[in-house]
Amino acid sequence: MATMTYPATVQFLYSLQQHGIKLGLETIRALLARVGDPQRRYPVLHIGGTNGKGSTAAMTASMLQAAGHRVGLYTSPHLIDFRERIRVDGAMIPEARVSELVESLRAAAVPDLAPTFFEFTTALAFQYFAECRVDVAVLEVGLGGRFDATNVVVPLASAITTIGLDHEAYLGSTIEAIAFEKAGIIKPGVPVVLGRMDASARRVIVERASAVSAPVYLLDRDFCCDGASTADCGYAGMRRRETHLASPLQGRFQLDNLACALALIELADEAGVKVPDAAVRAGLQQVAWEGRLEVIAHAPTVMVDGAHNPAAAHVLADFLAGWRRTNQAGRITLIVGMMRDKHPQEFLAPLLPVLDTLILTQADLPRASTGSELRALLADVAPAAQVTSTPVDAMALATRSAAPSDLICVTGSLMLVGEIKALFRGCSLSPLRG
């Protein structure tokens, strides 16, 4: 049988969304066993949490790579190109390898396995990392933790960055329930790094760690970063001390993510994956993580941020308030698009006091709310909100009235962020972005 073209392969992967989201490990374990359990061929660092896990993964991978290790990085979702999810030493998996590996995994799945999109993609990443003989893989949890497809690994160390309300339909409606699901990545005897979270969430996770004799390292107790921003900060960890570190990732919240990444690096170093001080500095200076407080144009400034839950909205609001203090002549326009399972009133509550104009729109996905639906939900709190049918129209509306000193911020959904980035790059989107 001839291998599918890359566009046909991506369309096949898209078709797997008909299986929806099925939390559980039976299918992914069976599929991986049929291809030789590639995830067992290299050490892993496993990173979960509600917010911050992607940035933490990117920083961790960059420091490891700067130390000379061959590093696999698996993240989700992608913004423009499906291949963003699977990288080795920063380079996306080649289109040809996507097609060839998908073909082999399809053959392994028949006749009795029906993997979901995320299960199939996770197996693809594990296969590619094994093929590339990576020295270490950094894995971002997709959804939750306990039943996430990435949770078939036994890592060198794990991290849980934050706990907040998100994906309640799958993870539960309370902080404690969500913490329980996230804590599912903790393995017997494997150390776990915990970022900033409520005491109730921390208690649930620490109890899980204690039950399986997993050492716990807590932010602000065992490690921390100090400084006003990631432009110049210090780290005090279990054994490591660093001063005058710098990273291009913006936002004070990145200090916590940086601290978690450095704590993971310490634990990896102890396990034999060495990262000297010079590599820490070089890796942090080189790190890139798209779609998080990312400036994509100037005069006016256009920034994209993938915040999509209330906790992330508070972080974004803090950044925008700081921007306004240093750019008093500038106005802030917010372009927002959200999925139907999100909570727009809670999301916008911290943002409304810091913006001048709100534009509501719809990302190009069936599960996205329309701008009109969002306006109806926000009628009491944002009666002056404007509505456009597409992100292109929203950006055109925002730029028509913007002065060079203004800020246009696109947020509410990583899918919307991907569309705006593709618009500015003048390229087409991969059809599969869920």
Image: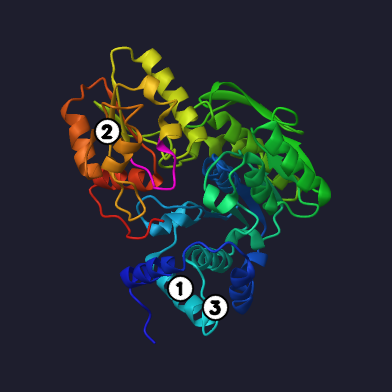
Q: Residues within 10 Å of mark 3 (few under 14, many from 20)?
A: some
Per the rendering, the mark at residue 359 is 2
Per the rendering, the mark at residue 189 is none
Q: Say which label, 3 or 1, has the lower sequence index.
A: 1
Of the residues shown, which amino acid type is indicated by label 1?
Val
Q: Say which label, 1 or 2, has the lower sequence index.
A: 1
Q: Where residue 85 appears, x then y in whole percent?
A: 46, 56
Please tell me whether mark 3 or mark 2 is closer to you in this view.
2
Q: CA distance from mark 3 to mark 2?
A: 44 Å
Q: Residue at x 28, y 19 (%)?
A: 331
Q: Secondary structure at mark 2?
A: strand
**Structure colour scheme:** rainbow
Which sits in the foreground, 55 or 245?
Answer: 55
How many callouts does the rendering have? 3
Q: Residue at x 25, y 43 (%)?
A: 391
Q: Secondary structure at mark 3?
A: loop
Q: Residue at x 17, y 25 (%)?
A: 401
Which sits in the foreground, 421 or 49?
Answer: 49
Instruction: Determine the residue located farthest toward the bottom in the rendered image.
Output: 1
Disc 1 designates what residue?
102
Which sits in the foreground, 153 or 88?
Answer: 153
Is residue 256 visible in the rendered image? The answer is yes
Please tell me whether mark 3 or mark 1 is closer to you in this view.
3
Of the residues shown, which amino acid type is indicated by label 3?
Leu
Vertical relation: 307 (above or below) 111: above
Magenta-tinted stretch: 337-344
Left or right of 324? Residue 214 is: right
